[in-house]
Amino acid sequence: MPSGKMHVIIAGIFFICILYFLNVKHYLDWTPIIYLPAFLLYTLLPDIDIPNSSIAPEFKKFCVLGVIIGFLANYFKPHTYVLFFTIFCGVMLVATIFTTHRKFFHSPLAAAILAAPLLYIGWKFALSAFLGYCFHLLIDGELFQGGVAS
């Protein structure tokens, strides 16, 4: 199983190569490079259920802060998006604590669920995140096995 750094390096090279080949007919327009951070971040996300992974501690801190800030924001000015973000952070925090590695988070279903909130930013960000997540599964050889059913 590749390390987190290796996932990011392979994914970054893959993303730039795909971007290059897709844009050959468009005079090398590199503006889609703004989707690279979502792609790379989501390449690491399947390993959030491993306590010593490179992303798990930071992701848990983000979720705890998201829940705290979300509750405070909802208290002072309730809004549907803030409530959705708060619930999402809480569910993800609980899920990372109670799931085992290579089960739910190593599935295309998890990729779709985790990429869905980025639809609020734009469908290209969500697609980039989904593809980055699936690329991690492809590198691990689990894309077509589906961690949920196994």
Image: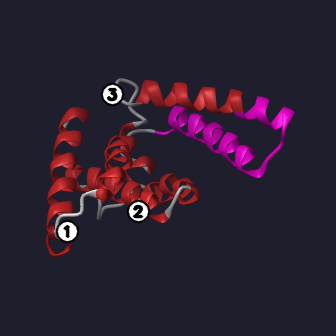
Residue 80 visible at all: yes
* Residue at disc 1, secondary structure: loop
Q: Position of residue 64 (x, y in %)?
A: 61, 27
Q: Does 122 sit above or below residue 61?
A: below
Say which label, 3 or 1, has the lower sequence index. 1
**Quarter-of-image position of residue 9:** top left
* C-alpha separation, residue under disc 3 versus residue under disc 2: 23 Å
Q: Classify mark 2: helix, strand or loop.
A: helix
**Quadrant containing the C terminus in the rendered view:** bottom left
Q: Which residues are magenta?
A: 70-99
Q: Categorize mark 1 by other alpha carbons within 10 Å: few (<14), some (14-19), many (20+).
A: some
Residue type marked 3: Ser
- What residue is disc 2 on? 127
Residue for badge 1: 23
Image marks 3 and 1: residues in contact by CB distance under 8 Å: no
Measuring 52% from the left and 28% from the top, which residue is drawn there? 60
Residue situated in front as seen by the camera: 19 or 69: 19
Which residue in the structure is indicated by mark 3?
54
**Numbered disc in front, either 2 or 1:** 1
Q: How many marks?
A: 3
